[in-house]
Image (tube, grey):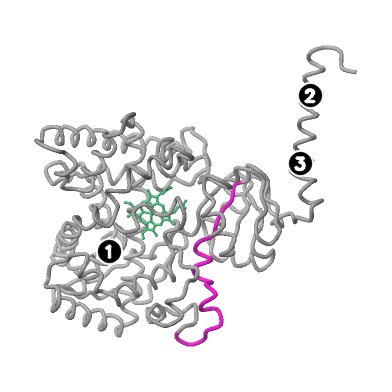
Amino acid sequence: MPESIAEWTTAIALLLLLMYVIREYVVPYYKGLKRVPEASVWPYFGDTARVFGDGEKLMVERFQQHGPAFSTWILGKRTTVVGSLDMMKMLLNMEHDLVEGDWPTSTKLMLGKGSVSVVTGALHVRLRKLLKPAFSMSGIANMIPKLAAIAEQCLSKWADEGQIKGMLATKEFTFRVILELVFGMGPDRLTPELLERCHKAFVMWDANLFSFPVNLPGFGFHQGMKARKVLADIVKDNIQHIREHISRRDGDASSASSTLAEGLYVEFDKEENPLTLDDMADTFINLLFAGHDTTAHTIARLLSELPRHPDIWERLSMEQTAVIAEHGTAFSTASLKAMTYLEAVMKETQRRYPIVGGVFRKALRSFELPGRYHIPKGRLMFLCLGHALKYDTRWAGHTGKLAPDQFNPERWLSEEGQKTGAFLPFGSGLRMCVGYLLAQAEMKVFMAVLVRGYAYTPQDVQEPWTTWPVGGYPVNGMPLHLERL
Ligand code: HEM
């Protein structure tokens, strides 16, 4: 029998540990559940290098070897990776109940504890509610002419330059969209110096978003956190500026919101317990992270693909002629809706080149995953959205033009394309992409402005893409010649 308080404490702690181990690791298997197969990797490092290197190939290999789920280590955490659509749908739709959004430690710290991607439970629901009006269909509708103006300014400037790098160009476009429309930085504030400073900080921050969380000089994470401070200062300064601008205006501020940013700030400040400046800054940095590279990469992938398919370009051009005849040259929700072929082209680009390969979740409690797999409480999970997109069963049995590896927008206009499948480029459930309507409008407007008034010739039609950084990069940055028609 234990005699002292220390002995009693140790005995109780051991008993609780034993009960936990029995509940989590013995009972489920006794009930017939299966352990998720383990990949044979080194603890802590595990598959990290390959997930962020040739993740796509790795997943195909591992799923072939282990079935639809396997456990490994990613960025220092034990992680269960899932690749089947039914598993993913269940997890995405049970947010805040079975699972909650989670990220590797470095990513959480870099995004900031108050950002919408990081917060969980009631706070997440509250932030989503605040963001909803600005990113709704009507919120985006007001922004369409501004999107077209930014696209036109960018393309016109690049045509004057003649020779440009396609990858940098698309990033310039989407960076401007976030800074001007989402942050609300007008030309009066967004000086070339500020743009440069912001861009430099973003690049350093972004490069170290997925790193080992060691905050010591010489480590990527340390550099990233320093860049984050620069970004946060710029964002906070801008929030103060917009608030002053809104309070100087007469009448109801919300009805007078002329940019998506103003709508956002009005919602943020309307709350009974307004968000702190730090929390607002976290969410704006989050919007930059979530909305800039994702959209730029998708457009760049299409720019690199199109020269290999002159027939698709021709059809896009014919569609624009028809849309102009019906809706005039101005862009609106109605004219964007009429661009059904462009929509199929964008969907095909997202299917073939998904920029968000996967999303992280943490198990809030132990549960059973389809296939009778046991998931212990606290387990980090990685849901391979990209894998599901590519291996959508709708195309699995097809050969020829509908084969999964073919770039063919027609598939989305076919009977199969109308059926429900594994098309989750923006995720699903309570964490589905906040900005998907903006992203769709942005990509369509950019491509429509390009097709209507410009032509481009890449230096190398077959330029390969690297697998790192996440989403890949054309090895030479996609040099191309752009001219006005
Ligand atoms: C092609 C472009 C884009 C793609 C493919 C994309 C994809 C995604 C995906 C898959 C998620 C779900 C993450 C999860 O389940 O954990 C997500 C979340 C998010 N996206 Fe996007 N996105 C794009 C553009 C944008 C844009 C333009 C914005 C806003 C400016 C944006 C803002 C967000 C935010 C804030 C979240 C976090 C939502 C939450 O955790 O509740 N995204 N995005």
Q: Which residue is mark 3?
A: 23
Q: Nearer the viewer, residue 44 or 444?
A: 444
Q: In the current view of this chain or complex, which residue is farthest to the left?
A: 250
SS class, disc 1: strand
Residue 428 part of the magenta segment:
no
Q: In the current view of this chain or complex, which residue is farthest to the top?
A: 4
Q: Is residue 336 left or right of residue 282?
A: left
Q: Quadrant of the C terminus?
A: bottom left
Q: Nearer the viewer, mark 1 or mark 2?
A: 2
Within 8 Å: ligand 1 and the Cβ of disc 2? no
> What residue sits 23% from the left and 65% below the top?
446
Q: Which residues are magenta?
A: 380-401
Amino acid type, label 2: Ile
Q: Is residue 108 above or below residue 420?
A: above
Q: Report the label total.
A: 3
Give residue 63's position: percent from left, percent from top. 64, 65
